[in-house]
Structures are given as structure tokens and as C-alpha cells.
Image (spheres, rainbow, N blue to C red):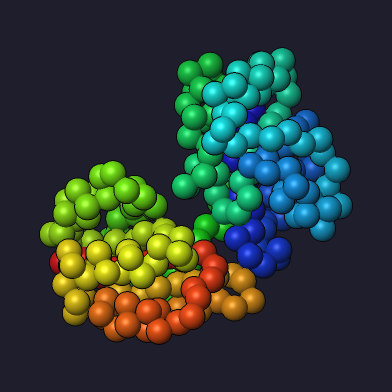
């Protein structure tokens, strides 16, 4: 079986008892980065063998993991932070497991966009998760397609592109559109700043440097 196991996005306590049990019981843990995951596993005294599985080796590594599972082993897939498959590797291996009739069990757990959305103060009964926008090609086209989206929109963004993103959001959705920027969710310096897109852009332009992982939540049309 393949287990998809969410890992903490900041605070190491943000992991379920079930996740810890699975990580101890499986035969192998496939990690986005074995060094990063090693910190978490050492913290909970988990000594299960590890192997790397990331964007650059997934097509080569997936057949090896499939072969192990077909031989009767259980494999857990974890990312550096959050739920496997949500803006991190996972989809390809799940699809291969489905194709080979290997059971897949996805555990519930930490992901950055849910707390950012629910703390934003914007409607969260219906929303659309867009993840990371294309860095260059297709970015404007994607935004234009969302211009009339009525649901709350959720984006991931890197800190060095935040001001550029807020400027583009302002151009497409209008400067008065309500939004929130959640930074460092579940970490020591967690911050949720709310306001219009214009106010948020002005605030972050005045900062000497923006740090941490970013979730941007924007009200629908």
C-alpha cells in the first residue's frame, strides 16, 4: 500500500498520532528531501528507512517504489511540509499506483492554504485553490481567466515575487478587492494581514525584505 502522510508546515506538533504510527510501521518512507524529513523523524524517534522522491527523480523512482509495493511492502510518501500532491510531488506516484491496482490511503493533516483561508475573514464556504501561478509564460493568461471568478481564490507565492503578484492581482481584480496575505503559517512569526489589494501592496512595498512562505487569499468577484 501507498500512504500519503502530511507533515508539519512549521510547528513540529502539527502531525497526527495516526501519521506517526504509519511512519513507524511502513517498510520505507519516500521523502522530498531526506535531510529535511530526517529532522522530523529524529524528533519523533522514527528509524524507518528513507529514500528520496522529488520533482527531479519521480519518473525514475516511481517504478522502483511500485516494484516494492507489488512485492508486499508498504511505502509512505511525505513532502518537506504539508500534504503530498498539493503543490509538491505526489500525483505521479498516486496515478501509477492506481494504474497498477495498488491501494492508496491518504491521511488528513497539515496544509498551508486551509488555515490561511479560514483566518482570512473572507468567505470560505466555496473557494478555488490555484496553487503557484506560472512564473512567467501563461501567468497573465491564467489571471485573466480568473477575472470574473465568483469564489474566493487561494494562491501560493514565493516571498521574492509577492509584490509583483499583488501588483498583477490589483491590475486584474481591481485595487479595492479585499484580500489577505498569510505568511509563515504555523511558524514562530506567523502573520495574517488583511485589507484591499492596494493596501497590501503598499504595505509590503514598504518592507525592506519579505520572508517566509506566502499564501494569498482574494475575495471572489
Residue 62 occupies quadrant? top right
Check the image and report above or below for 174 versus 134.
below
Residue 163 occupies quadrant? bottom left
94 relative position to 77: left or right = left
- Which residue does the image show at 67% across and 57% down from the upper left? 16
- Which residue does the image show at 19% across and 77% down from the upper left? 175
19 relative position to 84: left or right = right
Check the image and report above or below for 7 versus 62.
below
Check the image and report above or below for 6 versus 200.
above
Q: Residue most toward the front?
A: 208
* Residue 108, image x, y percentages: 56, 51
205 or 64: nearer the eye?
A: 205
* Residue 129, image x, y percentages: 35, 54
* Residue 60, image x, y percentages: 59, 21
Q: Residue most toward the left?
A: 148
Residue 3 visible: no
Count of numbered marks: 0
- Which residue does the image show at 53% across and 18% down from the upper left? 101
Image quadrant where one finds the N terminus: top right
Amino acid at each position: 500500500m501507498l500512504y500519503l502522510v502530511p507533515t508539519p508546515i512549521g510547528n513540529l506538533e502539527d502531525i497526527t498520532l495516526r501519521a506517526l504510527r504509519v511512519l513507524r510501521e511502513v517498510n520505507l518512507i519516500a521523502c522530498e528531501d531526506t535531510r529535511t524529513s530526517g529532522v522530523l523523524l529524529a524528533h519523533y524517534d522514527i528509524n524507518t528507512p528513507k529514500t528520496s522522491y522529488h520533482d527531479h527523480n519521480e519518473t525514475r523512482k516511481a517504478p522502483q517504489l511500485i516494484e516494492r509495493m507489488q512485492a508486499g511492502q508498504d511505502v509512505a510518501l511525505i513532502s518537506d511540509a504539508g500534504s503530498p500532491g498539493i503543490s509538491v510531488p505526489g500525483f505521479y506516484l498516486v496515478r501509477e499506483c492506481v494504474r497498477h491496482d495498488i491501494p492508496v490511503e491518504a491521511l488528513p493533516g497539515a496544509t498551508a492554504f486551509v488555515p490561511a483561508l479560514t483566518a482570512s475573514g473572507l468567505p470560505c464556504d466555496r473557494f478555488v485553490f490555484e496553487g503557484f501561478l506560472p512564473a512567467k509564460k501563461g501567468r497573465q493568461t491564467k489571471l485573466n481567466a480568473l477575472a470574473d471568478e465568483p469564489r474566493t481564490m487561494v494562491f501560493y507565492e514565493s516571498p521574492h515575487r509577492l509584490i509583483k503578484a499583488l501588483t498583477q492581482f490589483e491590475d486584474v481584480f481591481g485595487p479595492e478587492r479585499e484580500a489577505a496575505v498569510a505568511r509563515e503559517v504555523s511558524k514562530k512569526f506567523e502573520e495574517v494581514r488583511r485589507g484591499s489589494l492596494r493596501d497590501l501592496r503598499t504595505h509590503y512595498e514598504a518592507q525592506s525584505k519579505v520572508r517566509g512562505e506566502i499564501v494569498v487569499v482574494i475575495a471572489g468577484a
